[in-house]
Image: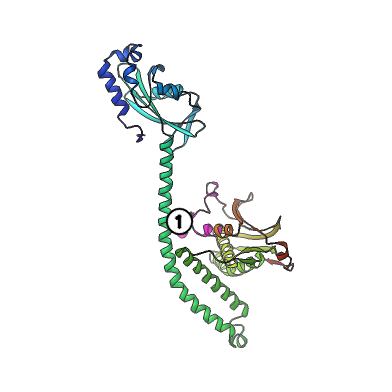
């Protein structure tokens, strides 16, 4: 490690100056450091002289530094603490002096102290190969570390903003291209719905199928609108009272054919087990919530390479409406549980954008709710959506009913 705060040759230059100015007596006579202390006191930073783990001399800055609160822990280049905790600065210096190799003349290390809130860089340099005397220069680099961390955060933020800018441009183009196609499809479906063809040939286009197709197109149009909003930084979609049982029913009906047909093509069995009663109303966007559930259903399907049962459950709890989506798949690696809702995080490689769960989390958060992920003890994962209920008077208007599908 060669940090900017301690130039690579700084301590070596001090050692060379000592050798030239004071000759060999500095390395061999025990009283030499004290006799020449006037030359060493002018060094910037905390300086000490050691011979075989014995501290021969320290300057005033070093004396004040010894008052710093330990324990001291070695810090790696990646910023992680490692090794045993050393109780005093003297122990740190002795350890670094012993770490000098036979052919090594200098080394630099970083230590944390004061409960890990501050950091110190310690540089040791051999004065002479003929005698075991080393100079030690120590400096507090806490402020430098904070500046480096702030710079790293800013770089990450800049990279993410650039990524978002590029994504915005792509989203705008996709939305423009598909919007015209959806408008034409929606118009023809509406014409079919209103025409006499529905009565003349109901088997060809059952009303329920037409209604589902219209809902799919409406949701797709809404999602494209969200893409345009994202690209143009527009305000969020308006909210309304939403019955989660209806949203889950619509989402399952939209996704069912896709989920089951894909499983059948792979020779797998995928069962949908849905039991969601009418719940207290929540305040959100029904279209946005359908996108959330569709994303969770598709993710659950992808997480079950051997097939299995996908369960959706709903229940009220302490003024909230709760929906869980469970799969019997491979589960989520523990190291990913805290990252899966971050933008651009994906485990699907080129097949994933890393935006599905992030956008779902954003929708739920805007509704003052929570979206969490966990692993099931029996295997697989469970995603839990918890949304606050509207006032009781609004919920009282809902009739008791249950949506079950299996």
Q: Residue at x 55, y 73 (%)?
A: 218
Q: Secondary structure at mark 1?
A: helix
Near-viewer residue (386 or 231) = 231
Residue 249 image point, x, y percent: 64, 68
Count of labels in the image: 1
- Quadrant of the rendering where the C terminus is positioned: bottom right
Residue 154 percent coordinates (x, y):
42, 48
| The stretch drawn in magenta includes residue 333 | yes
Residue 44 sits in which quadrant?
top left
Residue 139 found in image quarter:
top left
Residue 174 percent across, percent down from the top left: 44, 68
As drawn, is 50 to the left or to the right of 300? left
Q: Circle 1 sits on which residue?
A: 349
Q: Quadrant of the N terminus?
A: top left
Residue 52 rendering spot, x and y as whole percentages: 39, 16
In this rendering, the answer to whether 34 lies above or below 122 is above
Who is closer to the viewer here, 318 or 328? 318
Residue 83 shown left or right of residue 129 in the figure = right
| Whether residue 17 can be seen here | yes
The reply to whether residue 406 is in sight is no
In the image, is residue 143 above or below residue 318?
above
Nearer to me, 300 or 13: 13
Residue 57: say if magenta.
no
Residue at image x 45%, y 56%?
A: 349
Looking at the image, residue 329 sits to the left or right of residue 59; the answer is right
Range of residues picked out in magenta: 331-360
């Amino acid at each position: 490690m060669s940090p900017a705060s301690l130039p690579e040759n700084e301590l070596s230059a001090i050692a060379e100056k000592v050798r030239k100015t004071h000759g060999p007596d500095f390395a061999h006579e025990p009283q030499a450091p004290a006799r020449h202390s006037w030359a060493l006191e002018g060094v910037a930073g905390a300086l000490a002289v050691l011979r075989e783990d014995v501290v021969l001399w320290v300057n005033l800055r070093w004396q004040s530094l010894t008052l710093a609160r330990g324990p001291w822990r070695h810090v790696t280049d990646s910023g992680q603490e490692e090794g045993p905790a050393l109780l005093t600065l003297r122990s740190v210096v002795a350890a670094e002096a012993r770490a000098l190799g036979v052919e090594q003349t200098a080394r630099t290390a970083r230590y944390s102290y004061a409960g890990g809130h501050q950091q110190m860089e310690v540089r040791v340099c051999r004065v002479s190969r003929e005698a075991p005397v080393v100079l030690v220069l120590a400096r507090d680099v806490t402020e430098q570390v904070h500046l480096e961390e702030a710079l790293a955060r800013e770089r990450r933020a800049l990279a993410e903003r650039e990524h978002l800018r590029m994504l915005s441009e792509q989203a705008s183009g996709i939305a423009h291209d598909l919007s015209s196609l959806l408008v034409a499809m929606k118009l023809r479906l509406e014409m079919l719905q209103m025409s006499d063809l529905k009565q003349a040939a109901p088997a060809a286009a059952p009303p329920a199928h037409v209604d589902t197709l219209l809902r799919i197109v409406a949701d797709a149009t809404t999602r494209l609108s969200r893409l345009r909003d994202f690209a143009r930084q527009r305000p969020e979609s308006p909210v309304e009272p939403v019955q989660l049982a209806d949203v889950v029913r619509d989402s399952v009906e939209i996704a069912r054919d896709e989920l089951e047909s894909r499983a059948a093509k792979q020779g797998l069995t995928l069962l949908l087990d849905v039991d969601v009663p009418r719940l207290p109303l929540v305040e959100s966007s029904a279209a946005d919530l359908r996108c959330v559930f569709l994303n969770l259903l598709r993710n659950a399907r992808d997480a079950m390479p051997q097939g299995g049962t996908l369960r959706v459950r709903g229940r009220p709890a302490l003024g909230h409406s709760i929906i869980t989506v469970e799969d019997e798949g491979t589960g989520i690696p523990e190291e990913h549980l805290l990252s899966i809702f971050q933008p651009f995080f994906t485990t699907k490689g080129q097949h994933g954008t890393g935006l599905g769960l992030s956008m779902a989390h954003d929708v739920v958060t805007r509704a003052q709710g929570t979206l969490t992920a966990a692993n099931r003890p029996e295997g697989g994962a469970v995603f839990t959506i918890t949304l606050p209920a509207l006032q009781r008077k609004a919920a009282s208007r809902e009739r008791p009913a249950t949506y079950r599908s299996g």
